[in-house]
Image (spheres, helix red, strand yellow):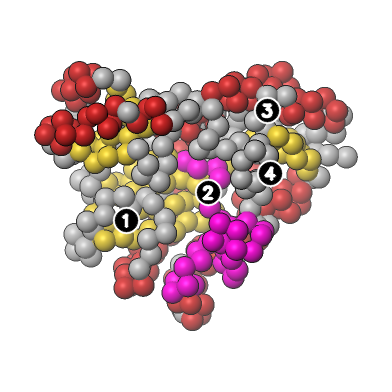
């Protein structure tokens, strides 16, 4: 008897529906899973009607980057017809907060969760008026609200900079077919540690009840895009260690706000991107990601492989193995709750069990 419907990415896209050890954790805590297409507008409802006598939960897990408006509407309509059934990761409607950063920022501000100031615009005139009316000014980030990894995002340092790039910027929207694509002007936060000469961001893994793990990403200070993974340099290892200690402190000291950054978006389990706003000397939230990278069961798939799946960068993996005895005492959440992916997902879904108990 199936207890969980997993509404997955469509088969027409990369089949990244289950991360390493994840499905085992779901079935351990919630019961047997049945997989179906979560993006075709019908399969979830059909699966529910067939198994509604036993199904107790839905795991909405569409593609956060490529899901478009008709697919989103189909997901919400199916969810509404099914009714009030507990969800494991995203609510159907809450998924819009995952893809559309302006929606997430609005909800965070309403719930006193710290995030950058911003406004949306369609034309050059709207941009200039929006900046004039805002409490922030240059430098700013201009981005598409549903972009990822710095794609269709530009750092604009002055008015001349905007004029030189405005035609390219105004074309950004045409490159996306998301749920509700918009151009955003976002306050540029100073996240550079001048003393260590690095730029830093954090990925924190949390449910709406608990903070499970996290890690720091450290890049050279001149690189403004610290949020992007895959930039590790062994030359920065001492700085990496320092900021992973900081990450553990943030996870513990800011648990309530981190959990609120998830629950306030009608979500239950996310990877949360966090930075330290150096100007205000406080943390600030940038986005959430239910499909955060942790590796997949297929060895070598997308560059992930044992022993940790993520990270897989050889110099970092070797360092972590060679210094395990010392470092696991200094950054235990990283070693025990992240590098150990089996334990990671066991803790995540155990926490979700508590959400609905």
Label 3 vs label 1, nearer the camera: 3
Assign the magenta stretch its main secondary structure. Answer: loop
Q: Residue at x 36, y 72 (%)?
A: 234
Q: Which element is circle 1 on?
A: strand
Q: Residue at x 47, y 56 (%)?
A: 214
Q: Which mark is residue 40?
A: 3
In this rendering, would 44 be left or right of 77? Answer: right
* Contact? badges 3 and 1 (CB < 8 Å): no
**Within 10 angstroms of label 3, few (less than 14), some, or many (20 or more) residues?**
some
Is 258 or 173 nearer to us in this picture?
173
Q: Which residues are magenta?
A: 288-317
Q: Earlier in the sequence, mark 3 or mark 4?
A: 3
Task: Locate the C terminus by quadrant.
Answer: top right
* Contact? badges 2 and 4 (CB < 8 Å): no
* Contact? badges 4 and 1 (CB < 8 Å): no
Q: Residue at x 27, y 40 (%)?
A: 154
């Amino acid at each position: 008897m199936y207890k969980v419907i997993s509404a997955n990415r469509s088969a027409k896209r990369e089949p990244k529906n289950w991360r390493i050890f994840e499905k085992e954790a779901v079935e351990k805590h919630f019961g047997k899973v049945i997989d179906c297409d979560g993006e075709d507008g019908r399969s979830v409802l059909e699966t529910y009607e067939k198994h509604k006598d036993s199904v107790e939960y839905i795991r909405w897990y569409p593609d956060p980057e490529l899901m478009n408006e008709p697919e989103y509407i189909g997901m919400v309509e199916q969810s509404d017809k099914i009714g009030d059934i507990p969800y494991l990761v995203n609510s159907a409607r809450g998924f819009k907060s995952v893809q559309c950063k302006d929606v997430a920022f609005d909800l965070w501000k309403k719930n006193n969760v710290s995030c950058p100031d911003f406004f949306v615009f369609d034309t050059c005139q709207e941009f200039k008026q929006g900046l004039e009316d805002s409490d922030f000014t240059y430098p700013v980030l201009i981005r598409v609200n549903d972009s990822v990894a710095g794609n269709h995002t530009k750092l604009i340092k002055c008015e001349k900079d905007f004029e030189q790039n405005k035609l390219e910027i105004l074309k950004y929207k045409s490159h996306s077919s998301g749920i509700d694509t918009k151009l955003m002007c976002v306050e540029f936060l100073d996240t550079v540690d001048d003393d260590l000469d690095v730029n830093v961001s954090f990925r924190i893994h949390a449910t709406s009840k608990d903070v499970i793990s996290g890690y720091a990403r450290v890049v050279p200070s001149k690189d403004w895009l610290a949020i992007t993974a895959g930039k590790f340099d062994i030359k920065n290892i001492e700085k990496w260690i320092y900021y992973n200690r900081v990450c553990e402190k943030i996870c513990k000291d800011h648990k309530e706000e981190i959990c609120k950054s998830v629950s306030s978006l009608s979500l239950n389990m996310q990877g949360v991107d966090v930075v330290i706003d150096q100007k205000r000397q406080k943390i600030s939230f940038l986005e959430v990601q239910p499909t955060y990278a942790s590796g997949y069961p297929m060895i070598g798939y997308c560059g992930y492989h044992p022993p940790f799946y993520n990270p897989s960068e050889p110099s970092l993996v070797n360092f972590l193995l060679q210094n395990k005895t010392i470092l696991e005492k200094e950054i235990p959440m990283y070693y025990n709750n992240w590098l150990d992916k089996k334990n990671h997902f066991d803790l995540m879904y155990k926490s979700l069990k508590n959400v609905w108990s």
